[in-house]
Image (tube, rainbow, N blue to C red):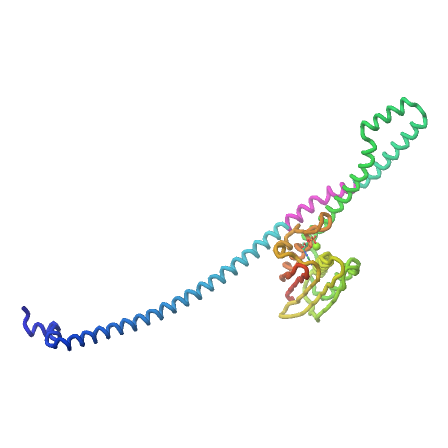
Amino acid sequence: MISKAEAIGNGYVIVISLSGKESYLFMMKKMEDTLKKNQEELIKKNKEIDESREKIQLTLEKLGKTYEELKASQLKILQQEKMASIGQLAAGVAHEINNPMAFISSNLGTLDKYINRLINFIQTQSEVIKSLKDMKAIDKIEEKRKELKLDHVIEDVKGLIAESVDGSERVKKIIHELNCFSRMNEEEYKKADINKCIESAASIVWPELKYKATLKKDYGTLPLTKCHPHQINQVIVNLLINAVNSIEEQGKITIKTRDKNQSIWIELSDNGRGIPEGNLSKIFEPFFTTKDIGKGTGLGLSITYEIIQRHKGDITVKSEVGRGTTFTIRIPVI
Ligand SMILES: Nc1ncnc2c1ncn2[C@@H]1O[C@H](COP(=O)(O)OP(=O)(O)O)[C@@H](O)[C@H]1O
Ligand SMILES: [Mg+2]
């Protein structure tokens, strides 16, 4: 048993000294208070959780965006490195192939002349033998002629040489384009008017262009900028030829230049066949071509890309199959 004083000291006294109903109400009130307090605490905690969730969501979104940006720049770097190394390799190979190609090409020309002479001689010889009316000799010659399939050889040999000459011309064209990579550094770097570079490129392409398209020029006033004028010229030639090639019958090509935000903008559009989406990431790669063998080298756009890189600019493409293509170039004004 505890004494009254002890009970007061321990706090039991309140319950003990209240009637049944009062004690019930008191307990209820106390429980209600505690519940309310817990509820308030819960609401506060919930709010905190909501806030944290929002923060996490935001961080996640930021992370996702950063990841996408990282992926894009990694792709860009990979692409740049791939093109730079293929370009250098190609220029080296071109240099090595150049010499043997020069004598192959020249020898083919001489061979063509010699073969013609030999054929001429064989024909004269067989006519002479026939005129001698020596049947034994004629039969022997005819037999040998058949055995060696000489008629077929004579017919075929000219075609073979013509094909080889054609092939070597193609190799020479590729070498010429590849050499642009290695010669790029040697060219003069000076202040120039890019509109003038474009104008001179347009006049180079004009003989090819005039039958296929109308050329609309929309030149803005441009400040002079430091560049390799011949290279810019080459870029426009490459783009114009591609534009002409993309037009089936009759089309329209537009060149627009503008000076904006310390940069020169060149926009070249055509209403040709367009580029399928799957090809858009490949067109700047060396040797990517959709043209027939002998028609395209697949080097035009990779050289173009390389030149714009060297000018610290960028080139982008937008295209819609059946509607046309627009290349946009930005070169910073220096
Ligand atoms: N204006 C254009 N319209 C449609 N396709 C184009 C255009 N420009 C480039 N292409 C596509 O990009 C490819 C690569 O171009 P390029 O590097 O100049 O090589 P090539 O012209 O020798 O094929 C072309 O074969 C073509 O498929
Ligand atoms: Mg081309």
Check residue 13 for magenta coloring: no
User: Does residue 275 lie above or below 26 as drawn?
Assistant: above
The quadrant of the rendering that contains the C terminus is bottom right
Total marks placed: 0
User: Can residue 204 be seen in this snapshot?
Assistant: no
Which residue is outermost to the front? 21
In this picture, residue 35 sits left or right of residue 119: left
Please name the residue shown 66% across and 66% down the image.
265
User: Residue 254 or 113: which is nearer the viewer?
Assistant: 254
Residue 284, percent across and down?
Answer: 64, 55
Check residue 93 for magenta coloring: yes
User: Residue 64 or 115: which is nearer the viewer?
Assistant: 64
Please name the residue shown 49% across and 62% down the image.
66
Residue 238, percent across and down?
Answer: 71, 57
Quadrant field for ligand 1: bottom right
In this picture, residue 263 sits left or right of residue 199: left
| Residue range highlighted in magenta | 87-106
Q: In which quarter of the image is residue 26?
A: bottom left
User: Does residue 305 lie above or below 13 as drawn?
Assistant: above
In this picture, residue 86 sits left or right of residue 166: left
Residue 32, percent across and down?
Answer: 23, 74
User: Does residue 150 lie above or below 220 as drawn?
Assistant: above
Please name the residue shown 69% across and 44% down the image.
96
Q: Is the magenta stretch mostly helix, strand or loop?
A: helix
User: Does residue 28 lie above or below 64 as drawn?
Assistant: below
User: Can residue 152 be seen in this snapshot?
Assistant: yes
